[in-house]
Amino acid sequence: MSTDDPGAPEPGDAATEGDAAEEANAELAERVDDAASAALTRARAVAAQRGLRPGSRPPRRTRRTPGQPGKRAPRDPALIGDQVDRLVTDRGWGVDVSAGAVMGRWPDIVGPQVAEHCQPVSFEAGVLRVRADSTSWATNLGLMRSEILKQITQVVGPDVVETLRIDGPSAPTWSKGPRRIKGRGPRDTYG
């Protein structure tokens, strides 16, 4: 027993440990109450800043339409067309996609009658090659070249097709590739 306080319980006594636990719980409850009241005060200040009053309904949120300016929330689903456009832009495929649009819309660009007699064959480095059914159609397309290029510019935009190369019907040839050397050519072909 302690000589200081004759009525005080011994250390390690069950009553002493219970009192200490009750004091700790009371202190913790007081801190929780302080934190809750502080959070409530902050929430009320934010609501007052937004113009909300206790008991009033918050303003309705309007749904954003695709053509409306503004930012989308990061978790909102994106439109597939927007995603494809972003992919084409990020990868640098703009010119290739435009050239594919020229080839796919050829009858719309030149008209159905002309499209029956010629078709685009290839697109490389701004040069669109078109093959005609006959030499007379190749000549006509050569005369219509500026109109066709104007139509292509209207459909897919400028700086996609810079040159339109028109080839006649394919005939057997022994030259390989786009470059040739002047001269007599092969002699012992049928020899």
Image (spheres, rainbow, N blue to C red):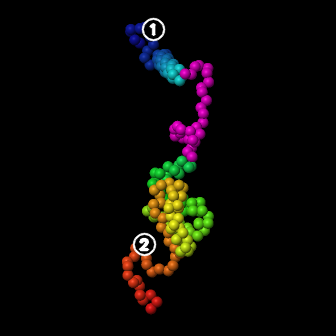
Identity of the residue furthest to the bottom in this view? 191
Residue beneath disc 2: 178
For label 2, count other residues whose C-alpha is less than 10 Å away and answer few (under 14), some (14-19) or many (20+): few
Q: Nearer the viewer, residue 19 or 60?
A: 60
Q: Earlier in the sequence, mark 1 or mark 2?
A: 1
Residue 43 visible, this angle: no
Q: CA distance from mark 1 to mark 2?
A: 114 Å
Residue 55 shows up from this direction: yes
Residue beneath the point at 62% across and 24% down: 57
Which residue lies at the image location 60% right of the left edge and 62% below the top edge?
111
Give SS at disc 2: loop
| Residue 144 in picture, x, y percent from top left | 53, 65
Q: Is residue 155 above or below residue 128?
A: above
Please give the range of residues in magenta.
Answer: 51-79
- Using the image, determine if residue 97 lies above or below residue 175: above
Q: Provide residue 119's location: percent of width, then percent of height.
A: 55, 67
- Which of label 1 and label 2 is nearer to you? 2
Q: What's the residue type where badge 2 is placed?
A: Pro
| Amino acid at the residue labelled 1 | Gly
Which residue is most to the front? 143
116, 95: nearer the viewer: 116
